[in-house]
Image: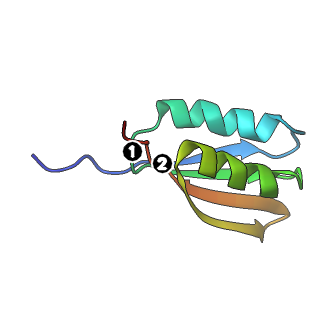
Amino acid sequence: MPPEAETHRRIDSRGEACPGPITDLALAYRRAKDGDVLELWATDPGVRSDVRAWAERTGSELLSVEDRDGAIVSVLRVRRRRP
């Protein structure tokens, strides 16, 4: 049986202050499957450190954090920790 195609989900948290962007990311993570790509768009500068810590805590892979079109765009690949 072939693996399911990954989903690329964009999360728009521009204009939200902490903890809004990470809360939005956590909600998307709950619905995501292992291997899905989540793209978080935020304007709160604190998201740079928050997203790194969140990725480490969940075991997800932080692919990039960059400035784009007036926002901070963080791209993560969902990695579920195995027991």
Mark number for residue 34? 1
Q: In which quarter of the image is the C terminus?
A: top left
Residue at (87%, 38%) from the top-left corner? 18
Relative to 22, residue 45 above or below: below
Residue at (63%, 34%) from the top-left corner? 26
Residue 41 left/right relative to 58 = right
Which one is earlier in the sequence, the residue at label 1 or at label 2? 1
Neighbours of disc 1 within 10 Å: few (<14), some (14-19), many (20+): some
Q: Is mark 2 on a helix, strand or loop?
A: loop
Residue at (61%, 50%) from the top-left corner? 55
The image shows a total of numbered marks equal to 2
Q: Position of residue 74 (x, y in %)?
A: 68, 58
Q: Position of residue 71 (x, y in %)?
A: 81, 60
Relative to 7, residue 69 above or below: below
Q: Where is residue 35 in the image (x, y as percent from the top left)?
A: 39, 51
Q: Where is residue 54 in the image (x, y as percent from the top left)?
A: 67, 46
Neighbours of disc 2 within 10 Å: few (<14), some (14-19), many (20+): many
Mark number for residue 78? 2
Q: Is mark 1 on a helix, strand or loop?
A: loop
Residue at (79%, 58%) from the top-left corner? 48
Residue 2 left/right relative to 57 = left
Q: Distance of mark 1 from mark 2, alpha carbons?
A: 5 Å
Quick check: marks 1 and 2 in contact, CB under 8 Å?
Answer: yes
Q: What residue type is labelled 1?
A: Asp
